[in-house]
Image (cartoon, rainbow, N blue to C red):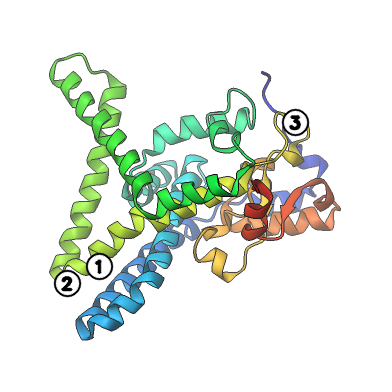
Amino acid sequence: MPVVKAARPKDIFAPDDWAAITRISPWRGIGLICHAWLVIMLVAGGTAWLWQWHIGAGLAAAPLALIIIGGRQLGLAILMHEAAHGLLHPDRRINNFTGQWLSGAATGSDLYAYRSYHLTHHRYTQQAEDPDLSLSAPFPVSKASLKRKMLRDLTGQTFGKQRGHQFTAAFNALKAIRAGTGGDNAKAIARTAGRFLLIQAILLTVSLMTLGWVPFLLWLAALATTFQLFARIRNIAEHACTPTGSNDPFTHARTTRAGWVARASVAPYWVNFHSEHHLFMGVPCYRLPDAHRLLGAGGYHPKMTIAAGYSAVLRAVAIP
């Protein structure tokens, strides 16, 4: 199918406004990565300290810790997505290094593979060639089906399946490399798994050198549970039950209003402004609220798919 129709910024924004919302800050992207890791360390460390003080206090704090840590893990994935678009830092080398090592590697992703995959998603949004179509095409689903998917996320089944596929692929890639039959793709697969394991080893070492096992176990538990759930809900909100293959660029994705609870969990770092992102890929995440405001001032909001909240989206995509 043909590439989806793109929006024309010069038809929508004044030149000064467009220049302002597409300016890439040399420090804000790095600051967001630091923020994500700082929140993770403070929450994991604080919960571990409570655990040492009184096991009951630690157990009581653990569910909230898993929510917050899982939300920041999703934030790291979102910041890798920024780097895939070249929006994390104006220097390409810094952009790629931070996107690969300081954000993507922690959740098992490879920046370069994701970049190729994701830009294809933008070119063919909600069409047969869209590699993300399988995430949205099944919707709407029954409430029972949606609950089963979420239960798999929260019980670690999704994580186990994903990591199992990743490590099996990495093992096969290593065998091919040792046999002399592995090409660049095999090397990339093996290196992605290696980076993921290296980051986990570093986090485990820091955890054991400071507050014992608890901080790392909280990180790992969140990665296996809440991160998976939040990533699923975010994916559903972005494209499920939106027009497929439309020629109207304002319908390619959904923007979802997010309060502070959503921003701490399913919608870190302005990822909820997804319609704006699909309309204008060159706008950094921290300027998407400005793009949203300018679109509203220009009278474009009625053309967009804007949900009142994530609970509203889940109600819309689940049928009795």
Marks counted in the figure total: 3
Displayed quadrant of residue 68: bottom left
Horizontal relation, residue 83 to residue 129: left or right: left
Horizontal relation, residue 243 to residue 189: left or right: right
Disc 2 residue type (three-letter): Thr
Instruction: Name the one closer to the observer, 108 or 227.
Output: 227
The structure residue drawn at horizontal position 53% and vertical position 29%, both measured from the top left corner, is: 131
Q: Which residue is mark 2?
A: 210
Contact (CB < 8 A) between labels 1 and 3?
no
Query: Mark 1: which secondary structure?
Result: helix
Contact (CB < 8 A) between labels 2 and 1?
yes
Estimate how packed mark 3 is, as few (under 14), some (14 to 19) or many (20 or more) residues with alpha carbons within 10 Å.
Answer: some
Measuring from the top left, give residue 125's x and y in whole percent.
63, 32
Q: Which residue is mark 3?
A: 246
Instruction: Name the one closer to the observer, 107 or 116.
Output: 107
Mark 2 or mark 1: which comes first in sequence? 2
Distance (Cα) linking label 2 and label 3: 53 Å
